[in-house]
Amino acid sequence: MIEIFLKTLPFFALIGLGYWAGYTRFFTAEATAYLTRFVFYFALSAMIFSFTSNLTLSDVWDTNLVLGYLAGTVAVYLIATVFALLRRQSLEVSAVEAQCAVIGNVGFLGIPMLTLLLGDAAIGPVVMIVSTDLIVFSGLIVILITLSREGRLTLNTFRTVGLGLISNPMIVSVVLGLTWAALELPVPAPMNDFLTILGAAATPGALFAIGASLAGKSAERLQTALWLTFCKLGLHPLMVAIGVLWLFPVDSYTATVVISAAALPVAGNVYILAQHYGVAPQRVSTAILVSTVFSIVTVSAVIAWFTAA
């Protein structure tokens, strides 16, 4: 585990550097927002396209992987939802807490870290997880919040979900990359160099942005945050492991990638959704902060356990 921990340490050190920059206001909240936008729309998109343009659909799509990941994730989603409802939380708050319990920082942290630690072959399973999270659970939270507030669903609700998906640069990058690969088009040298240079900014930029954004988050409702952290860092990888190792078995390498991705801390986009809809943004903020701190140890432990298995 020590060897894996030392390999993951530079990633978390970059997050720590970003936190320092945000805490001291060397990087303002506005600067952090623009850096995040650059990474999300440009650098990370270039990295994803570079990877997926060299893949085939069979490299990405694995029915057992999707079913196993969904089985484990839905189980944790239901546990978090039921626990929230038992505490007499509203449906919309329960949906946000459940989102914290299962949606990890796969885009900004998982793609760069897991491809470096586990090899370039990890990109296929990781892309599949990102796509599943975005298509299934990002749409689900919008549906549940709308249902909680309006008591019914309309065509406009599904239009909002659809527009959100087709405007997401990660989804667009995956589709364009796989289409390019399917057409067997060569990537011209200048284009490849451009994507390589731009994509190289994704890892440091994303990690720095994570840290800087954490500096602006306050720690409130710590007890709830600790529960959600346990769900995300403990229950989620455990249930996904059951899903991909026993219910819908995949090969050991793919299982390691998927379980490691499930062990990542709560994603920042959950906070964006919570803030946008005005649903419990402070408890989400605390869950992101607490889960990121604990993940410095837990992510290394999960990766070390399954790579040694």
Image (cartoon, helix red, strand yellow):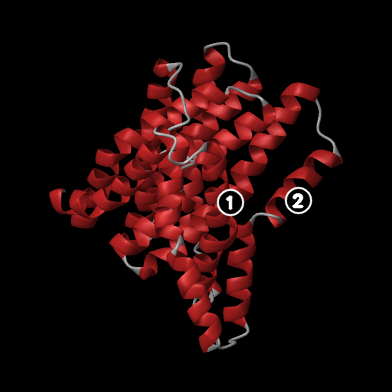
- Label 1: how many Cα within 10 Å (few below 14, some 14–19, many 20+): some
Q: Is residue 270 left or right of residue 308?
A: right
Report which residue position mark 1 lands on.
37
Across and down, in percent, residue 185 comes to 59, 87
Q: Nearer the viewer, residue 30 or 205?
A: 30
Kindly identify the residue that appears in the image at 76 percent across and 51 percent down.
163
Q: Quadrant of the C terminus?
A: bottom left
| Mark drawn on residue 156 | none
Across and down, in percent, residue 154 comes to 85, 36
Residue 243 in sight here? no
Kindly identify the residue that appears in the image at 35 percent across and 56 percent down.
113
Q: Nearer the viewer, residue 1 or 80?
A: 1
Image position of 257 with respect to 295: above or below: below
Q: CA distance from mark 2 to mark 1?
A: 18 Å
Residue extending furthest toward the right: 155
Q: Is disc 2 placed on a helix, strand or loop?
A: helix
- Label 2: how many Cα within 10 Å (few below 14, some 14–19, many 20+): few
Kindly identify the residue that appears in the image at 52 percent across and 12 percent down.
87
Residue 150 in sight here? yes
Report which residue position mark 2 lands on.
163
- Would you say the residues marked 2 and 1 are in contact, meaning their CB atoms lie under 8 Å apart? no
Q: Earlier in the sequence, mark 2 or mark 1?
A: 1
Kind of residue at disc 2: Leu
Across and down, in percent, residue 254 comes to 37, 61
Kind of residue at disc 1: Arg
Kindly identify the residue that appears in the image at 63 percent across and 50 percent down.
135
Across and down, in percent, residue 273 comes to 62, 35
Q: Is disc 1 placed on a helix, strand or loop?
A: helix
Image position of 192 with respect to 20: above or below: below
